[in-house]
Image: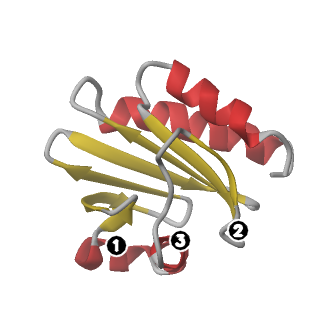
Amino acid sequence: MSNWQTHVDAMTSSGVVKKAAIYDTQGVLGGATDGFALQGEEFKGLYMLFAQPGDAFTSGVVVNGVTYLTLRAEADKIYGRKGTDGVVVARTGKTFIIGVHDEGSSTQAAAVVVEGLADQLRGTGN
């Protein structure tokens, strides 16, 4: 992996995404905001949700110890919400990109940031 922390910092500097992380497909953390990381079996859970996106609607999306109600689940993206907070997870060929927003933003706005990075990485083979 290259310097994934630069991408994490760019997502959070958008003012939309408050916490972010990038993992490779083996669950190795490439970069994250301070104090934000998947816990225990959360990576495996995300990995399985991308394999069977429909399951996200029954199990929810668990990130950093928080279970989000699934709003959208597809083979390359999952959106979740809990109260006024939300999460967007995008999968590329080599990465999982996670962005969390708070009440100051929306899941749709966070999706633009997270999916924009995912599209950029897909364009470079990542």
Mark closer to the observer (3, 1): 3
Which of marks 3 and 2 precedes in the sequence? 2
User: Which numbered disc covers residue 43?
Assistant: 3
Q: What residue type is labelled 2?
A: Thr
Where 91 sits versus 32, above or below?
below
Q: Is residue 125 left or right of residue 84?
A: right
Q: How many marks do you count on the picture?
A: 3
Which of marks 1 and 3 precedes in the sequence? 3
Q: Which amino acid does label 1 sit on?
A: Ala
Q: What residue type is labelled 3?
A: Phe
- What is the x, y in percent for residue 123? 80, 42
Which of marks 1 and 2 precedes in the sequence? 2
- What is the x, y in percent for residue 10? 62, 25
Q: Name the residue under label 2.
A: 25
Where 45 sits versus 116, above or below?
below
Q: How crowded is mark 1: few (under 14 residues within 10 Å), some or many (20 or more)?
A: many
Q: Name the residue under label 1.
A: 56
User: Residue shown at 36%/76% (left/top)?
Assistant: 54
User: Residue shown at 24%/41% (left/top)?
Assistant: 85
Q: Is mark 2 on a helix, strand or loop?
A: loop
Mark closer to the observer (2, 1): 2
Q: Which residue lies furthest to the front in this view?
A: 35
